[in-house]
Image: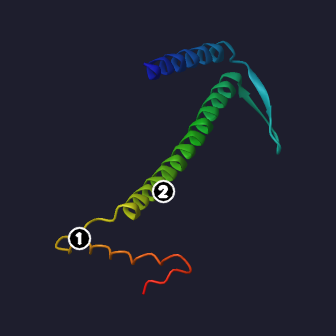
């Protein structure tokens, strides 16, 4: 449901930008660091909107790739920790040997056992 609302809002925003840019068609000067050019305002508005969308999409994609790499690394780390905690049983291996019985505790000091 959230994706549908996001799509509806994006379409409304695009419609508002399109209407705003169609109303403003006069040429305007655009100053660059290296010069000046005349462009119709509609091109400046649409170009700015498209460039902004591209930058936001690129940043979002980079974040997703980083998160996916981190998730994979953590999953490998978790799997290694699980394998270290519970090593897999090998087929045909003998049962673990019984623990040797503990030796009798030494008697209290000063007692003679003879």
Percent across and percent down for residue 52 are: 64, 33
Q: Which mark is residue 90?
A: 1
Left or right: where does residue 91 sit relative to residue 16?
left
Give the residue number, with chain letter if any, for mark 2: 73
- Residue 27's place in the image compared with 91, above or below, is above
- Quadrant that contains the N terminus: top left
Label 1 vs label 2: CA separation?
A: 27 Å
Q: Image point 65% across, 18% down: which residue?
A: 21
* x 33%, y 65%: residue: 87
Q: Which mark is residue 5?
A: none
Q: Is residue 96 above or below residue 28?
A: below
Q: Position of residue 41 (x, y in %)?
A: 71, 23
Of 107 and 42, which appears nearest the observer? 107
Q: Is residue 27 left or right of residue 6?
A: right
Q: Quadrant of residue 63?
A: top right
Q: Secondary structure at mark 1?
A: loop
Going from N to C along the chain, the mark reached first, 1 or 2, is 2
């Amino acid at each position: 449901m959230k994706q549908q609302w996001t799509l509806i809002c994006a379409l409304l925003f695009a419609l508002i930008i399109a209407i705003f840019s169609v109303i403003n068609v006069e040429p305007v000067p655009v100053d660059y660091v290296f010069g000046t050019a005349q462009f119709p305002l509609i091109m400046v508005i649409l170009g700015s909107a498209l460039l902004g969308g591209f930058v936001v999409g690129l940043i979002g994609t980079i974040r997703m790739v980083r998160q996916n790499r981190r998730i994979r690394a953590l999953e490998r780390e978790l799997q290694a920790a699980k394998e270290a905690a519970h090593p897999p049983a090998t087929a045909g291996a003998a049962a673990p040997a019984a623990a040797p019985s503990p030796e009798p505790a030494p008697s209290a000091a000063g007692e003679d056992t003879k």
